[in-house]
Image (spheres, grey):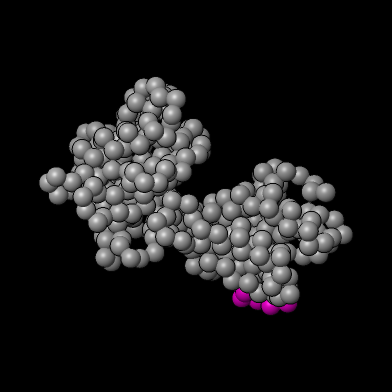
């Protein structure tokens, strides 16, 4: 049986695997963002176990208008996982063993690096363990990728003094973004990309705007359609809004230790052939009696948008509350 719940194992691994005096110096890890190396025998990759791995880790990302995988998968047999190939930033290794077990390795061969090893006596038991813990495994790998993304952001950061002054928060984002709008109650931050743009909005609303309605998703849609619709510039007679044909995804999360609603869906401009994905975080800030609203959205027609949205999510999740407001 599995020895510990996955969340507890993650905590233990982070404690036990930190650098210690005298520990060997690790080289830097490698690999593109959102790329996952799968280490398992080729014959298992071609069978039901491989199908499960592909379904759980190369399945489609929620909230995108087209199908894009959670991770770009590179599979290799166990005997090939050596030398430079062991420097991949994230890897999932599957092995046969007398007992069923899942372990998380922090910086085993390079730094930063997260490896997850799944072992079991037979294919069905391994499939069951992966299926049960796949969501947590995905989040573990995504956390590693977010940290790497923010490390890259910090190489050329944009100043966030205005966010500190107006909203009492810090946020890490690169200097490729510019402040397009800085009203006291609504900030719009933009980055130009080939054939489109990436956008961030920041504003705050009272608790009542979301909590008064028992239908949380309806309240969030109404809020963003009203405030973003009033502040996002579009052609006369058109309006920025939540695309009405498909209900957004909604789930609970936390940012800087505060409870938040995460909403993912599609925006469009009524009357125009303009649309794209968005992610919205409504963070409950009890101290200031408000919901802080952070949103990222992309306009990039006929192009993949997974990595753009991943960048925006990483930036928004970097927000920290300070006491300057």
| Position above or below: 48 against 106 | below
Across and down, in percent, residue 211 comes to 41, 24
Taking depth in this image into account, of 42 and 78 the one nearest to the observer is 42
User: On screen, 155 above or below 237?
Assistant: below
168 in magenta:
no
In the picture, measured across the screen, residue 43 lies left or right of residue 233, that is: right
The answer to which of 136 and 26 lies nearer the viewer is 136
For residue 86, say whether it is visible.
Answer: yes
Residue 181 lies left or right of residue 283; in this view the side is: left
Picture coordinates of residue 111, whole percent (x, y): 58, 62
Q: Nearer the viewer, residue 58 or 281?
A: 58
Residue at figure coordinates x 32%, y 33% from the top left? 223
Left or right: 190 as drawn, with respect to 90: left
Quarter that holds the C terminus: top left
Name the outermost residue toward the right: 98
| Residue 311 in view in this figure | no
| Image spot of residue 308 (x, y percent) | 38, 58
Of 285 and 147, the residue lying toward us: 285
Give the residues in magenta: 79-85
- Residue at position x 34%, y 43% in the image: 244
Quarter-wise, where is residue 197 in the image? Answer: bottom left
């Amino acid at each position: 049986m599995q020895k510990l719940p996955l969340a507890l194992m993650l905590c233990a691994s982070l404690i036990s695997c930190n650098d210690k005096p005298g520990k060997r110096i690790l080289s830097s890890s490698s690999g593109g963002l959102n790329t996952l190396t799968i280490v398992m025998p080729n014959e298992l990759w071609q069978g039901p176990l491989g199908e499960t791995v592909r379904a759980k880790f190369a399945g489609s990302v929620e909230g995108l208008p087209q199908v894009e995988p959670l991770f770009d998968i590179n599979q290799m047999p166990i005997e090939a996982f050596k030398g430079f190939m062991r420097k991949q930033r994230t890897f999932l290794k599957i092995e046969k063993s007398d007992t069923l077990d899942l372990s998380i390795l922090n910086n085993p061969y390079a730094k930063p690096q997260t490896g997850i090893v799944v072992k079991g006596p037979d294919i069905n038991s391994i499939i069951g363990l992966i299926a049960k813990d796949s969501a947590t495994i995905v989040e573990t790998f995504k956390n590693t990728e977010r940290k790497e993304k923010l490390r890259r952001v910090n190489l050329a950061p944009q100043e966030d003094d205005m966010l500190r002054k107006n909203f009492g928060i810090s946020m890490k984002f690169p200097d490729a973004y510019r402040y397009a709008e800085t009203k006291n109650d609504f900030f719009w931050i933009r980055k130009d990309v080939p054939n489109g743009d990436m956008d961030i909005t920041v504003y705050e609303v009272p608790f009542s705007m979301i909590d008064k309605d028992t239908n949380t998703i309806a309240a969030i849609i109404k809020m963003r359609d009203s405030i973003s619709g009033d502040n996002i510039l579009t052609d006369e007679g058109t309006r920025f809004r939540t695309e009405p044909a498909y209900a957004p995804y909604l789930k609970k999360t936390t940012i800087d230790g505060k409870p938040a609603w995460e909403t993912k869906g599609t925006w469009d401009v009524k009357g125009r052939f303009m649309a794209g994905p968005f992610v919205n975080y409504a963070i409950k800030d009890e101290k200031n009696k408000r919901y802080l609203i952070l949103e990222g959205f992309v306009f990039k027609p006929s192009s993949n948008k997974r990595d753009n949205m991943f960048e925006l999510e990483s930036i928004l999740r970097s927000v920290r509350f300070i006491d300057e407001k």
